[in-house]
Every structure is written in structure tokens, then in C-alpha cells.
Amino acid sequence: MPATDDDGPPDPGADPEPDPGTGTDPGTGPGVVTGPARRAVAAVWRIESARIVGALARYTGDFALAEDVAQEALAEALVAWSRDGAPANPVGWLLTAARRRAIDAFRRRAALDERYALLAAQLTEGEAAPGADRPDELPWDPDRIDDDVLALVFTACHPVLSPEARVALTLRVVSGLSSEEIARAFLVPVPTVQARITRAKKTVAAARVPFALPPAEERRARLGAVLSVLYVVFTEGSTATAGEDLLRPDLAHEALRLARTLTALLPGEPEPHGLLALFELTAARFPARTGPDGEAVLLEDQDRTRWDRSAVRRGLAALGRATSAGRGLGPYGLQAAIAACHAVAPSAAETDWERIVLLYEALGRIAPSPVVELNRAVAVAMASGPAEALAIVDDLLAADRLPGSHLLPGVRGELLTRLGRTAEARTELELAARLCRNARERAVLLRKAAALG
């Protein structure tokens, strides 16, 4: 049915920094670094950034310094790897380079400082230079990696930061998103995101926020912010805001991994289980969401035999744990319940659309947003017909609730098509295509518009 496809979770909101892979060469000047080196650095950062920054934050005890020296190590790697080739152990290379940068920073801050003395003692005369490929050089305990990353998330979500700063900082240091990617996710200018990140790091440093998992009594106060961050990361992975690919499974699976870690840390809290259920049930459809050439496949056209049934079982089990807490489902649990309706249905036509409408109504009461209302309209169209759904969409249009988004004209075009208002439908679908920044989604919209010619 309509362009939202119900295949991603519905939305429930300076100084330049180096972004590997964005075309900015931090510290070396344009034209110095070759393409392969830049791609290698960007790939390592995308996969390992959270673990690198988390290990450095524990190592230095300074969250802001850890992110700064990690970025400096990236700039160093861009030059060295272009010259010498990527090392066999790129994470070890970056950690060693960043650790040396941290020691230099402590040396500048205070000669003979106790912390400098402790760190300097660890950097022995025989320590390998950056580029060494010895796994025992990694300055982290592998058993603490998950705790490091989770501590990183909780630190970035500290109450001293504004909600916007928490999300931007966490997406930056935990998930390795560039400023451009974060800006697209929030529909704000890149300099705004860069300024938020810079201010957030300065605030964390000024407030002397410790790098550690908060005590149990503080975790619940920060939990909502942490869940929101993981949700945004997963949403970007499940339907990319821009680019040539519909999915970014690396981001989605990182958010999924963090959600699993969070439920293990907070087993008695229902909403982390609801969030995990939503992620599992949504990710279960990933194998069927794209065709052989990467083209988008809408929900009603998907081969449901390709859905990951193991992920469905894990998602339903997590939803069961969220429900059994006896507090009622929160926003993420309700979205998981909607995803569960799709997961157990034999086909789009046999889906329990009436239940989905009720779940969206409940979600709209506790977490109202125009995208939730738009998704409710999609469900209403399936349950009761397009005319009733179009009234909901037109109310959103009249209130200008989704300015600049392709979602509303995409859904409206679908509804008008079903009502036989072909000329209007084609206009809406073409508008949606112009607004859409994801090439795969745009192709679907253009194909639908052309079919009405």
C-alpha cells in the first residue's frame, strides 16, 4: 500500500569536525589522500567507532578527550595509510595512535600529573609504533567492550545535555555517523549539527561527567534518552534518509546489538524489551525488502518466505517480556505490537488491520507525532477504505504537519490512486519523488506516477 510501506518504525527532533568519508580531509589539505585509504578509514570508523571511543574514554577517563584523540588518529591514518597501505590490524593502529595523542594532551595539560605518569608508564620503550599488527596491543579488555559502548551511550545521554545534543553526540561518537548524515536525519543544516556536537562535548567536559555506567537509581532517568538514540540509529539503518541504498544494515544491526546489551543490563525495564522487539521484528523483513538489484520491494509485494523467522521469534519473545512486566506497553512496545501483526500475517490482505488501527490510536495518545498519524491513515485505508484515510491525510496537509517530507504526498498519491483521482494522484507522487532523497524510494514513486500516465 502507500509509500510509508510500514517497513520502518514510525517516527515518535560551530566548529567543523572531521568526518571520514565525507570528502573532508582532516589536517592534511585537499588532494593529499587517495581514495582507497579514505574508504578504508571510513569503513573501520563506521564499524568500530563506538568501541574505539569507548575504550579510549575508559583508558583516559575523559569522554571529550577520547573523541578528540580518536578523530586525530583518523586524520593521521588518512595520511599514513595512503602512503603505506592499510595495516592488518587497523583498530589496533588507531587505538595506539590515539593513545599517543592522549598522552601528548596530558603532557601539555600538566607536567608530572599523576594521570600522565600512569599513562606514560604504560607506553614503554618497546611499544610498537602505530601500524603494528599485534592483537595484544589493543588497550581494552574484550570482555568489557559492551560495557564500554553502553557507558558511552549513557554518558552522551547525560541530563546536562539538551535532547537534541544527546542524540547528535551519541550518533556521532557511538554510531560513527558523519555530521552530514545526522543533519539529514534531523532535517537541519550541517553547521547546526556540528555546533551541537561541539557544545555537547564542551558541556560534558565542563560538568566533569564521569565515563561510567550510572548507578541503578540514575539509569531510569536517562533511559528515555538512550532508547530514543537507539531508535533514531535503527530508523536510519532500516530506511536510509538519502543515498543510493534503501537499507543501511550496519547501523540497524549496531542499534540492535546495543538494544540487546541494554535489555541484559536492565532486565526489569519493559521499554528496552519493547524496543528490542521492534528492532528484531523490523529487521526480520530486511531480506525481502530489496530485490536482486537493490530496488525497494513494498510490504504487499514481499516474499514472506524470505523473512527471517528466527528474528521474528526473538522479537515476539522480547515483546512477551515487555508485556509481562504488567505496566502496559510504552511507545516502543506499541510499535513492536504493530510490527508483530505484520510478522504473523500470511499476507498483506490477511493482516489484522483493525488491530493495527487501534494500536496506532493508542500510540498517538502517548507519543503523538504527524508520522504516527500518517501511518494510522495507511492502516485505516487498509481496514476501512481510502476515503476515510484521505480525510486524515488532508488534515495533516492543512495543518502543515510534515513540511518538506516526501511521506505525506506519497501516501496521498496512493490514496488518490485508489479513489480513481488519477491526475491528482500523479501530481502528488511526482511531488513526493522530488522531495525524496533516497534513490530507491524515489524510483518506486516515479514508477507509480508513470503507471498513471
Image: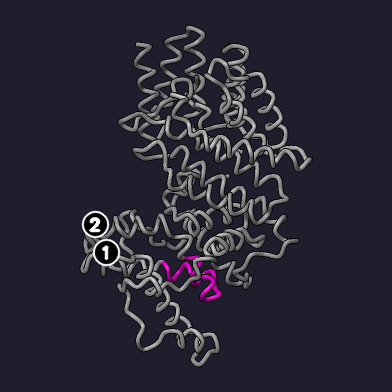
**In this rendering, is residue 317 above or below 264?**
above
Foreground mark, 1 or 2, reads 1
Main SS category, magenta section: helix
**In this rendering, is residue 277 above or below 296?**
below
190 on left or right of 324 = left
Q: Earlier in the sequence, mark 1 or mark 2?
A: 2
First to last magenta residue range? 53-70
Give the residue at x 28% y 66%.
87
Give the residue at x 26% y 60%.
37
Q: Mark 2 points at which residue?
A: 36
Q: Which part of the image, by quadrant, shows the C terminus?
A: top left
The type of residue carrying mark 2 is Pro
Colouring scheme, one of rainbow, by chain, secondary structure, one colour: one colour
Q: Name the residue under label 1.
A: 86
As drawn, the residue found furthest toward the bottom would be 112
Say what secondary structure mark 2 lies in.
helix
